[in-house]
């Protein structure tokens, strides 16, 4: 049986290839976005399975065959025009996806590409507002951006091309690895990329993921029907399945090295000067020269594949109980394999939408402790910090981790609550001004340090992705927003807030019994900053799993 794995060079794709090769399937075609990543995946698989017959394809499957290697920005016009035109034979035959399948004629296609992210995460709201603000002078490319960001036309065209490709090439089974868009959490999810909460951009992704599932559901109810030609009654329509993991898929690797964000190395900055932020001033980072570049950030990280690299504390927070938790790529591969060979796993969402979601697992929970143990050991070995990289999102996560670490670097938590606030304020201020490691980490990831009453330590970074890294008026409303979401706050009021949090945590630990009623106990709540932030997300921000199963 010949198998085509779309997105086969990714974390889940490689695990699926390994599972099928282990079980004796030799013929696999791996398709990925770039030639380099596909060849790298094949090299790794060949070392473990030298007798395997591995072939490869590369390029953007949503593009035309001739444009498969071009950046999305360069082919946006043709992608949009293909999506809004009436479906025809020319559009089908020009498609890179159709050509891949036609060249190799696989019997099974396993699609691990995160279609919802690829098509939906383009912020239609921002683009629409920009167009409305410039109605008198709209550039043509803006219109193409708007249509592309609306996503649904692109998704519908993708489904049409997919179905006709499956029918014309007599594919037996198509299995999609889908997404919930929020890692199994609700609209109270705290892990956004700095948008408002709930994030409309993230909800658009979830909406598209849901639309994608229902369109696949329609395909599963479709007989041997061809959109472009008369059906052949002798042929059988393909079996359509979707597996939908609903938690963080982790992990790919643990290492110490350079930290990258959006394929760019994260630069280190330092700054000792304090900018005075006065009410009524206009803050415009373009006209401020703060922050001295001091090389590239190197630290300990855990690689979660498509989601990027996380610090120890970011990983600790997102995988904490009642947060996104985790599932391993090997478990997804196991389910895909069993469904392919005909065993029912109950995880096919097409046949059981309401009960087919793959939940956080015992294995991932068990391996979480192993991963954290490895991270802790390497943290000691490399004398690393691994506090926050601001890749997981939102900025509030990094801000809270860094505030918790600020306290932890100076006090024991059970002592902190009884020390005079004024004394704490002076000590934290002195620490920030003298400790360049802490300061560099914070401002290099775009989290400034606010010092009561009007001090701000920040860097003018190359990567600017926070709300404060723009032009804004220094009024109470803006400053309140930044203090809550994007700035480390050294103030007497915030110290009191942290004291109250620690009191509540200590009270929770004190009141814990040895029953299963309580999620956390004194044995696993060791005041690590990631665990504390997970507690804040759950208790204060109400960012927790409402339905556990």
Image (cartoon, rainbow, N blue to C red):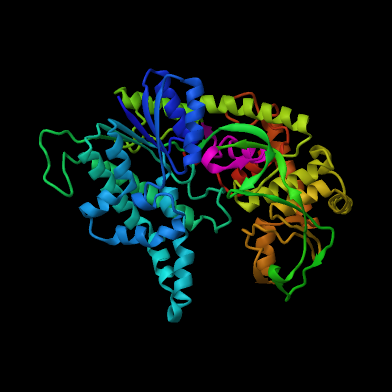
Residue for point 40% across, 60% down = 76
Is 267 magenta? The answer is no
Dividing the picture into quarters, in which one does residue 531 lie?
top right
**Residue at (64%, 53%) from the top-left corner?**
395
Q: Is residue 524 visible?
A: no
Residue 338 percent location from the top left of the image: 35, 23
Give the quarter of the image for residue 319.
top right
Height in image: 523 above or below 280? above
Magenta region, residue range: 305-327
Report the quarter where the C terminus lies.
top left
Between 111 and 63, the one lying in front of the other is 63
Determine whether 323 is above or below 541 in the image. above
| Residue displayed at 73% across by 27% down | 377
Q: Residue at x 58, y 24 (%)?
A: 366
Location of residue 9 in the rendering, given as x and y in whole percent from the top left corner: 47, 36
Percent of width and height locating residue 255: 66, 33
- Return the residue found at the far bottom: 136
């Amino acid at each position: 049986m010949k198998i085509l794995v779309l997105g086969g060079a990714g974390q889940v794709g490689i695990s699926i290839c390994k599972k099928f090769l282990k079980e004796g399937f030799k013929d696999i075609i791996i398709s990925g976005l770039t030639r380099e990543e596909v060849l790298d995946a094949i090299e790794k698989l060949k070392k473990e399975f030298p007798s395997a017959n591995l072939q490869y394809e590369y390029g953007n499957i949503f593009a035309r065959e001739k444009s498969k290697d071009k950046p999305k920005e360069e082919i946006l016009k043709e992608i949009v025009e293909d999506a809004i035109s009436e479906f025809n034979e020319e559009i089908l035959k020009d498609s890179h996806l159709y050509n891949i399948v036609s060249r190799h004629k696989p019997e099974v296609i396993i699609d691990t590409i995160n279609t919802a992210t690829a098509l939906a995460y383009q912020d239609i709201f921002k683009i629409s507002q920009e167009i409305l603000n410039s109605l008198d002078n709209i550039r043509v490319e803006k219109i193409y951006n708007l249509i592309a960001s609306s996503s649904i036309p692109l998704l519908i065209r993708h489904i049409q091309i997919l179905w006709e490709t499956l029918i014309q090439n007599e594919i037996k089974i198509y299995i999609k690895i889908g997404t919930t868009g929020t890692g199994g959490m609700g609209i109270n999810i705290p892990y956004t990329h700095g948008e408002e909460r709930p994030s409309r951009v993230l909800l658009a992704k979830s909406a598209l993921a849901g639309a994608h599932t229902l369109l696949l559901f329609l395909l599963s109810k479709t007989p041997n029907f061809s959109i472009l030609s008369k059906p052949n009654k002798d042929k059988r329509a393909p079996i359509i399945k979707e597996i939908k993991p609903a938690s963080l898929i982790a992990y790919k690797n643990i290492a110490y090295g350079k930290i990258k964000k959006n394929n760019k190395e994260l630069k280190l900055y330092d700054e000792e000067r304090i900018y005075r932020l006065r009410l009524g001033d206009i803050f415009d980072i373009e006209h401020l020269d703060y922050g001295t570049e001091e090389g590239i950030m190197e630290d300990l990280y855990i690689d979660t594949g498509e989601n990027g690299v996380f610090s120890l504390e970011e990983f600790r927070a997102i995988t904490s109980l009642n947060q996104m938790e985790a599932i391993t790529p090997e478990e997804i591969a196991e389910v895909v394999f069993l469904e392919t060979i005909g065993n029912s796993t109950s995880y096919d969402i097409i046949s059981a939408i309401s009960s087919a979601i793959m939940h956080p697992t015992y294995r991932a929970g068990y391996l979480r402790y192993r991963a954290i143990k490895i991270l802790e050991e390497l943290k000691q070995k490399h004398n690393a910090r691994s506090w926050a990289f601001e890749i997981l999102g939102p900025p509030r996560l990094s801000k809270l981790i860094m505030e918790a670490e600020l306290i932890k670097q100076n006090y024991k938590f059970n002592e902190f609550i009884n020390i005079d606030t004024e004394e704490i304020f002076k000590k934290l201020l002195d620490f920030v001004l003298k400790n360049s490691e802490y300061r560099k980490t914070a401002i290099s990831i775009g989290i400034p340090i606010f010092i009561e009453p009007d001090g701000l330590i920040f860097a003018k970074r190359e990567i600017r992705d926070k709300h404060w890294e723009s032009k804004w008026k220094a009024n109470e409303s803006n400053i309140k927003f930044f203090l809550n979401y994007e700035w480390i706050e050294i103030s007497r009021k915030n110290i009191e807030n942290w004291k109250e949090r620690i009191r509540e945590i200590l009270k929770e630990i004190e009141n814990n019994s040895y029953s299963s009623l309580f999620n956390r106990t004194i044995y696993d709540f060791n005041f690590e900053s990631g665990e504390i932030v997970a507690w804040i997300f759950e208790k204060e921000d109400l960012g927790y799993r409402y339905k556990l199963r």
